[in-house]
Image (tube, rainbow, N blue to C red):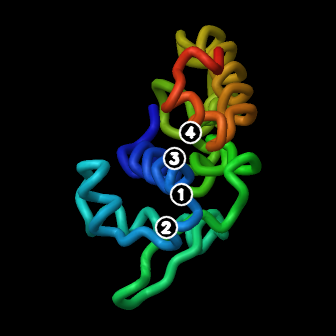
Amino acid sequence: MLSNSCRYGIRAVIYLASQPLSNGKTGIKKISSDLDLPTPFLAKILQLLAKHKILSSSKGPHGGFSLLKDPRKITLLDIVNIIDGYDTFTNCVMHNGSCEGVEKVGKHCPLHKDYEKSRKELIKLFSNRTIHELVIKSKNPELITI
């Protein structure tokens, strides 16, 4: 459902949120190495998140990335909207375009009613799950339940 870009972005933001504040900026090579992700691809994703004020970015020998926003205020939905767009939740599973657009030109796809329920649950989950919670859960999986 989510693109590789979006999954990589989520993983990187969780990674950065888990770094001690005393570390300051974390370089792209360290992030990509620790997460086993391709450096040039990850750099573009992180620059996009910096452009949207989720991350702070600086160049140079002591440059890198850090969180600009409080991880308690960053939701999964924020990251998905920035990287993949809200269309992720509104597009039809089988047809091109949004379910509303498909409805205007004909009938819904056979999965529409089933997916509509799941879509609402996904939006709710992504809206309510913060990066801070995911950092805690990654360290102690039993602490947070979905």
Q: Amino acid at mark 1?
A: Pro
90 displayed left or right of 7: right
Indicate which disc, 4 or 1, sits on the residue closer to the N terminus: 1
Left or right, 50 with respect to 45, comes to right
Query: At label 3, which amino acid type do we have?
Result: Ile
From the image, tell me which residue sits under label 4.
135
**Mark 2 nearby-residue class (10 Å; few <14, some 14–19, many ≥20):** few
Which residue is pictured at 30% across the width and 63% down the height? 30
Give the quarter of the figure containing the N terminus: top left
Q: Judge the density around disc 3: few (<14), some (14-19), many (≥20) Cα neighbours within 10 Å.
A: many
Q: Which label lies toward us, 3 or 1? A: 1
Residue 144 in percent (x, y) is at 64, 20
Q: Residue at x 50, y 25 (%)?
A: 93
Q: Residue at x 53, y 57 (%)?
A: 20
**Residue receiving disc 1:** 20
Q: Dot 2: what SS?
A: helix
Mark 2 and mark 4 in contact? Answer it, CB < 8 Å.
Answer: no
Residue contact between numbered discs 3 and 4, judged by CB atoms under 8 Å: yes
**Image location of residue 87, percent across then percent down:** 60, 43
Give the CA separation, mark 2 to mark 1: 6 Å
Q: What is the distance, in whole Å, between disc 3 and disc 1 at their CAs?
A: 12 Å
The secondary structure type at the circle numbered 4 is helix
Which one is in front in this view, the residue at disc 2 or the one at disc 4?
2
Q: Amino acid at mark 2?
A: Asn
Residue 92: percent from left, percent from top:
55, 29
Of the numbered discs 2 and 4, the one sitting upstream in the chain is 2
Q: Residue at x 64, y 25 (%)?
A: 122
Q: Residues within 10 Å of mark 4 (few under 14, many from 20)?
A: many
Residue 48 percent across, percent down from the top left = 51, 68
**Quadrant of the rendering where the C terminus is positioned:** top right
Inspect the image, locate mark 4, and give the three-letter code of the amino acid beneath it.
Answer: Val
